[in-house]
Image (cartoon, grey):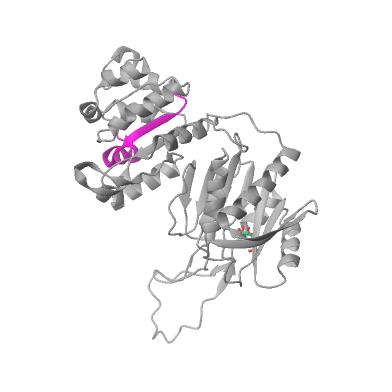
Amino acid sequence: MSGGIAAYKAASLARGLVKAGATVQAVLTEHAAAFVGPPTFAGLTGRPAHTGVLTDAHRVLHVRLARETDVAVFAPATANLLAKLAHGLCDDLVTSVFMCLRCPVVLAPAMHTEMWAHPATRANLAVLRDRGATVVEPGEGALAGGDSGPGRLADEDELLEAVARALGTASGPLAGRRVLVTAGGTREPIDPVRFIGNRSSGKMGYALAAEAARRGARVDLVSGPSHLADPPGLRSVRRIETARQMRDAVMQLCDDADVVVKAAAVADFRPASYAAQKVKKDDEGFTGVPLERNPDILAELGRRKGHRVLVGFAAETDLAEERGREKLHRKGLDLIVVNRVDAPDAGFNVDTNRAVLLSAGGGRSEVALTSKAGLARVVWDRVESLLDETRPPAPADASTP
Ligand code: C5P
């Protein structure tokens, strides 16, 4: 715990974790201890609550605590704590333990809206997410001092669920499964101002990621620019811009994935060169933007498929199903979700969709107009049966952060 008023809620969280069967070790910053006393946590957890690096100095407390930990939860994580964690400062017990951790990390930020929105906090969280931490986003509501807005510690149930997911002990039909989802469109820069992009909003991919998490999977999301908030309960969310950045993130994350769902609308082409200065409209020499082909991430995954279930999307404006079937085979997929993007109630940027699901085994099913969350449920039902047919769940692995 770090020093915010939400530290009082951490007492209830500690109790909830104990009730769920965990052995809980409370570690408080000096300021957290000013909000809620260590004896409260000692009473709730049945173990001494620690605040100082120098307690038990001869046994190097911070190293020992980190080694004994299966999952570390930082709740509340103040803006100050996030800054320290992102930069590797370790000037107290909480931060020193963090530096020694080799287990999954769950961060539950809580702070005033201004601090939450500050670019420094955003950048620190991006660093921590990139290093594999799960961030349980704060909710919106009453804050200290009579204020209200985003910044309030996430609900206890959400935190307990995030801990279970980090430990691989979440329940649900996808428990123990590791899922990678891509979402949104990519942006391919022409110059510092302009890019080539597409109309994808990320809604379909975010719905797929949220549904997988709800079913107990450990989910990583790689997203192009999107105005949507991170879906709850994911292990990580990486935000990228270009197809090549998406490829790098996917290749880093796919190795231990059981399922990869590529809902992203990846730009097929990018400008062959990037103009470091804005291209001026009166530039006489300007003749157009030559393009070159982007890597096909899904096809690359299909070539080194291994044990993974691969799901692709085909956004089409004509001959949808034929093209979808051709892509299914050419890219080595198990399942493709074919949807028309030229109807006003389906495809890009709307909340509804309709689709045809084609599977490598020859299966075909039509999904009539439904919400994107509804289509996500159908896709995961189908993936679950593909997994059951071929791959028993791997044992829970708590060692990968
Ligand atoms: O070939 P097409 O772009 O229609 O294929 C769509 C599917 O392939 C989607 O699942 C999309 O995420 C994926 N894709 C990709 N890399 C590309 C282009 C598409 O992974 N460069």
Query: In the rendering, at what x and y percent does residue 153 appear?
Result: 34, 39
Determine whether, in the image, residue 235 is placed left or right of residue 26.
right
- The quadrant holding residue 43 is top left
- The quadrant holding residue 14 is top left
Q: Nearer the viewer, residue 85 or 111?
A: 111
Residue at (75% x, 63% y) in the render: 326
Residue furthest out toward the right: 362
Q: Nearer the viewer, residue 401 or 245?
A: 401
Determine whether, in the image, residue 189 is placed left or right of residue 93.
right
Residue at (22% x, 47% y) in the render: 147
Residue 247 visible in the snapshot: no
Query: In the rendering, at what x and y percent does residue 70 appear?
Result: 47, 25
Asked if residue 74 lies in the magenta stretch, the reply is yes
Query: In the rendering, at what x and y percent does residue 296 appear?
Result: 63, 59
- Classify the position of the N terminus by image quarter: top left
- Quick check: 39 above or below 3? above
- The quadrant holding residue 216 is top right
Asked if residue 327 lies in the magenta stretch, the reply is no
Q: Nearer the viewer, residue 351 or 325?
A: 351
Residue at (52% x, 48% y) in the render: 221
- Quick check: 297 above or below 342? above
- The span shown in magenta is 69-90
